[in-house]
Amino acid sequence: MSWLDHAASVTVHPFTRQAGSDEVVIGPTPAGRFLSLPLEAVALLDELALGKTVSEARSWYESRYGEEPDIEGLLEHLSAYGVVSLPGAAPQAAPSVTPAATRPTYHLTFISERVARFFFGRVAVALYGAVILAGVVALVTHPGLLPTWRALFIPEHITATSLLVMFLSLSTLALHELAHLVAARSRGVSCRLGFGNRLWTLVAETDMTGVWALPRSQRFLPILAGPIYDAVCASLVLLVLLASQKGLISLSGWMLRIGTILLFIHGMRLLWQCYFYVRTDFYYALTTFWDCKDLMQDTEDFLRNQLARLRGRSGPVDQSHIPQRERRVIARYSAVWLAGRMLAFGLVFFVQVPLIIHYLPLILRAIAAGLQGGLYAFLDSLFVITVWLVTATLGLTLWIRELRTPARRPTR
């Protein structure tokens, strides 16, 4: 006889909910996480919250849905996340999933919702849209303003250029992540800032788990706030460079160089968002729009199955449990996934490879010549190669650790 046969009632702790097409997102848990549950499971929780005993809730479910629920498995799973409190015998049966004992620490909570709404209210967003539109018009009418990889190639000062690019990249990246945080705060959601990786690339991240508590229509602005910031900054730089080209303002050579590098950085970051084979801001916006739970993994499984069929084999992953609506989305997204791969390879061959081809011989010659080739040239090249190796090693280390960690698939 299980513990449920004795239970008079179960305590259901308060939670928010946002209904999707066929599931409901509930939370936050004591660890600040959100869970996706079937509509029927949430309805069962509601009955228990009204004070019904487990047996009464079971009878209600059987009467309404015509089948017996796995109420024991559901409650044991939810108890591990702190959504429900079970009778005394429950802990020994609880699964091994153990959330953090306390809620996560949020950053920059001193930013009030009122201040955040000033930057991401309707008027501000409309202004951002106008600036981006002006930038697009400037780019279409003057495509020569768009910089190439040569904007980052200054052979006389490799270290100075690298430090400048690094400083501008890190500072704009911090503002990119801050935009996510402020946009989320404008909707009453607290966030955390941190570092992570996308494949072997080291990136900054904003943990916006709390946006799942928002209606789906209100999640898009926090998700897209970073790209909006990049697009606005790129547009402003474009307009300044155009004004300089037309003689409306006067900029020094170094100011023009910095502006061009900034435009290149923001443009590359926007292109990075189109790497749809990794979880970028645009990816999260699409999954929110299509209301999919694990679009990335499902798409990769779909492509594996298609490749297996081309080889005359059966698909290695069974996707029959996925709702038909999501399967149609997965089939469409697979083309977007492949396009993201092609874009990534294109940028490698047309941006990164040319820079390496032009810089690497200079660096290697300077290091091989040692101090005889000049102290500045030697230290210049040594510093750059060290920075490249350190960042690449950190990114690869995080990626390898991620590959070794078993992936946890969400239950449907």
Image (tube, rainbow, N blue to C red):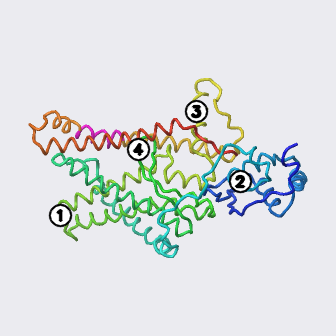
Q: Amino acid at mark 1?
A: Ser
- Residue 128 % position (x, y): 43, 68
- Image-based side of 234 in relation to 366, left or right: right
Q: Main secondary structure of the magenta part?
A: helix
Residue on which the image places disc 2:
23
Is residue 333 inside the magenta stretch? no
Q: Which secondary structure lies at badge 4?
A: strand
> Front-most of 252 and 40?
40
Give the vertical position of 212 relative to 309 (above or below): below
- Residue 265 % position (x, y): 34, 54
Q: Which mark is residue 201?
A: 4
CA gap, disc 4 and disc 1: 34 Å
Which of discs 4 and 2 lies nearer the camera? The answer is 4
Q: Amino acid at mark 4?
A: Thr
Identified at 79% across, 52% down, the residue is: 88
The magenta stretch spans which residues? 348-359
Is residue 352 inside the magenta stretch? yes
Q: Which secondary structure lies at badge 3?
A: helix
Q: Which secondary structure lies at badge 2?
A: strand
Who comes first in sequence, dot 4 or dot 2? 2
Identified at 62% across, 23% down, the residue is: 312
Who comes first in sequence, dot 1 or dot 2? 2
> Front-most of 135 and 218?
218
Who comes first in sequence, dot 3 or dot 2? 2
CA gap, disc 4 and disc 3: 24 Å
Q: Which mark is residue 304?
A: 3
Which of discs 4 and 1 lies nearer the camera? The answer is 4
Q: Which mark is residue 252?
A: 1
CA gap, disc 3 and disc 1: 54 Å
Q: Residue furthest front?
A: 88
Q: Which secondary structure lies at badge 1?
A: loop
Who comes first in sequence, dot 4 or dot 3? 4
